[in-house]
């Protein structure tokens, strides 16, 4: 068996956690290798963030073309899929280029830990051993499969839902979280009859009702049927249809669709061949690895980042932890601080949040002042014909320091970064209000929401 040279850092998994960790480790002068059993770039690049956003952008263009009556043909979906693949390939190529340019050794195969300093890499019957001084585990997650709805045939996970070759006539989505809403609205824009089944009282359950409302209105306008308080029970499928039975108000009802998409969360890849048990690394009841503020596990030279650790399963959270872990290995005093992790739903209108919501601040008994401003009279939003939504800023009542913010509206995904920076820097609403924002831009609504909070502070409420 081939035994490779010892590395300072071995990274297992090449998603936005793993590849960023490998890059940072190499940039800090450490001999670094990364192992990937699938495709470089991980879930995010191949079956997550990037393909979904490419298809969402295409669905939006498709809907606009249809509205403008430019004679869209069914061939357009093939083109949309081809465009998605082009974007994915470019992104994956970029990851490969960056790793190579930084001098990272890329190893293909499935890594399993043999002991605390050795991993075995298996690929198509061949095995290699590699020794490491430090390891960063970044093996990510996979869709949760419900026993009653095993993936296959007409029951899809998000992975298959992003790779259909034709626009489905009808699609039933089990789970109204952000992935269900994004993919549901996307297919509705392509012309699919979409139904979302959500167990809770509202789709996008993590968001306050006033923030989810504009998205729900647009989902309805796009023809999406939303059934809340519903529990999917069983599915029957034949060659061309699927019947899904669900319980609502203790009554069994059913809905018929061409496909069902199950999006009820993700499961960390900490089981199977990774071999955590061989080195005595424990996982929680949810399969997550516990880490300290430097992303270090209970074995001090082994780190864990991204979807296999607690916190939101988001690409930028994985990349953030990646930098901290690599810097910790290099002996730097970097530590994680989770107070400003943005969360974005790429719906129409977009929804974005960072820091505390008003509800969370109240639950923590933090006295806050709320600043709000709508896109309704913003010149740029009007010009873009996207004047729906508002900005909400939550600030400490005494100091005015921004502790949270939410945006529902056009380009919320980009706008939220200003508020993440404000929280990160400890900025006040006055800082935001007195920052000159160019006119006419969407960012002016942030400035106006901050002004609203400053006025309320001056008035003492
Ligand atoms: P992953 O990206 O899951 O990568 C882990 C890699 O490790 C995989 O490539 C896997 O093959 C490899 N691996 C696993 N085990 C081994 C092993 N034993 N040996 C070798 N390799 C191994 N997040 C956002 O922030 N924004 C979004 O818009 C967004 N959209 C999403 C849309 C969808 C449809 C989905 C499914 C997810 C989306 N996410 C989004 C979530 C995001 O994709 C994940 O949070 C992110 O990919 C996690 O990164 P990671 O590095 O932890 O792991």
Image (cartoon, rainbow, N blue to C red):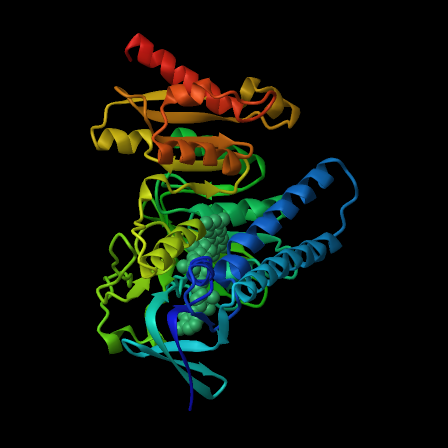
| Most foreground residue, 201 or 450 | 450
| Most foreground residue, 335 or 345 | 335
Up-down: is 270 above or below 318? Answer: below
296 displayed left or right of 268:
left
Residue at 41%, 41% in the rendered image: 342
Look at the image and tell me whether residue 173 can be seen.
no
Quarter of the picture holding the N terminus: bottom left
Residue 174: % across, % down: 43, 53
168 displayed left or right of 146:
right
Residue 259: % across, % down: 54, 59
344 displayed left or right of 361:
right
Residue at 34%, 68% in the rendered image: 135
The residue most toward the right is 71
The residue most toward the front is 29
Up-down: is 120 above or below 25? Answer: below
| Most foreground residue, 193 or 401 | 401
Q: Quadrant of ligand 1?
A: bottom left
Residue 435: % across, % down: 47, 21
Quarter of the picture holding the C terminus: top left
């Amino acid at each position: 068996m081939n035994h490779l040279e010892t590395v300072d850092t071995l990274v297992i998994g090449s998603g936005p956690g793993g590849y960023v960790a490998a890059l940072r480790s190499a940039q800090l002068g450490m001999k670094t290798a990364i192992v990937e059993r699938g495709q470089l770039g991980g879930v995010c690049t191949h079956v997550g963030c990037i393909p979904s956003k490419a298809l969402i952008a295409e669905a939006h263009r498709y809907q606009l073309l249809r509205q403008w009556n430019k004679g869209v043909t069914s061939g357009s979906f093939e083109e949309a899929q081809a465009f998605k693949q082009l974007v994915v390939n470019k992104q994956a190529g970029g990851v490969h280029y960056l790793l190579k340019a930084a001098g990272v050794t890329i190893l293909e195969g499935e890594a399993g830990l043999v002991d605390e300093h050795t991993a075995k890499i298996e690929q198509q019957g061949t095995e290699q051993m590699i020794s490491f001084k430090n390891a960063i585990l970044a093996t990510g997650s996979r869709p949760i499969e419900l026993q009653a709805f095993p993936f296959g045939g007409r029951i899809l996970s998000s992975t298959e839902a992003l790779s259909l070759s034709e626009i489905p006539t009808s699609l039933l989505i089990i789970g109204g979280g952000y992935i269900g809403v994004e993919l549901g609205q996307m297919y509705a824009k392509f012309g699919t009859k979409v139904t979302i089944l959500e167990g809770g009282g509202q789709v996008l359950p993590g968001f306050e009702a006033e923030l989810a409302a504009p998205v729900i209105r647009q989902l309805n306008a796009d023809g999406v049927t939303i059934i809340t308080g519903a529990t999917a029970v069983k599915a029957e499928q034949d060659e061309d249809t699927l019947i899904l039975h669900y319980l609502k108000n203790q009554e069994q009802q059913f809905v018929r669709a061409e496909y069902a998409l199950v999006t009820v969360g993700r499961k960390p890849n900490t089981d199977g061949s990774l071999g955590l048990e061989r080195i005595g690394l424990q996982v929680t009841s949810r399969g997550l690895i516990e880490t300290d503020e430097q992303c270090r596990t209970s074995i001090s030279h082994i780190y864990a980042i991204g979807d296999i650790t607690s916190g939101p399963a988001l690409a930028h959270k994985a990349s953030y932890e990646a930098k901290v872990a690599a810097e910790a290995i290099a002996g730097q005093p970097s530590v994680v601080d989770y107070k400003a992790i943005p969360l974005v739903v790429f719906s129409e209108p977009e929804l974005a949040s960072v820091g505390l919501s008003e509800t969370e601040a109240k639950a923590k008994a933090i006295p806050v002042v709320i600043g709000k401003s709508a896109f309704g009279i913003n010149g740029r939003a009007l010009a873009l014909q996207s004047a729906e939504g508002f900005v909400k800023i939550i600030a400490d009542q005494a100091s005015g320091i921004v502790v949270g913010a939410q945006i529902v509206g056009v380009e919320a995904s980009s706008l939220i970064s200003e508020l993440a920076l404000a929280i990160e820097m400890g900025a006040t609403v006055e800082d935001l209000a007195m920052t000159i924002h160019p006119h006419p831009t969407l960012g002016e609504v942030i400035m106006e929401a901050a002004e609203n909070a400053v006025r309320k502070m001056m008035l003492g409420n």
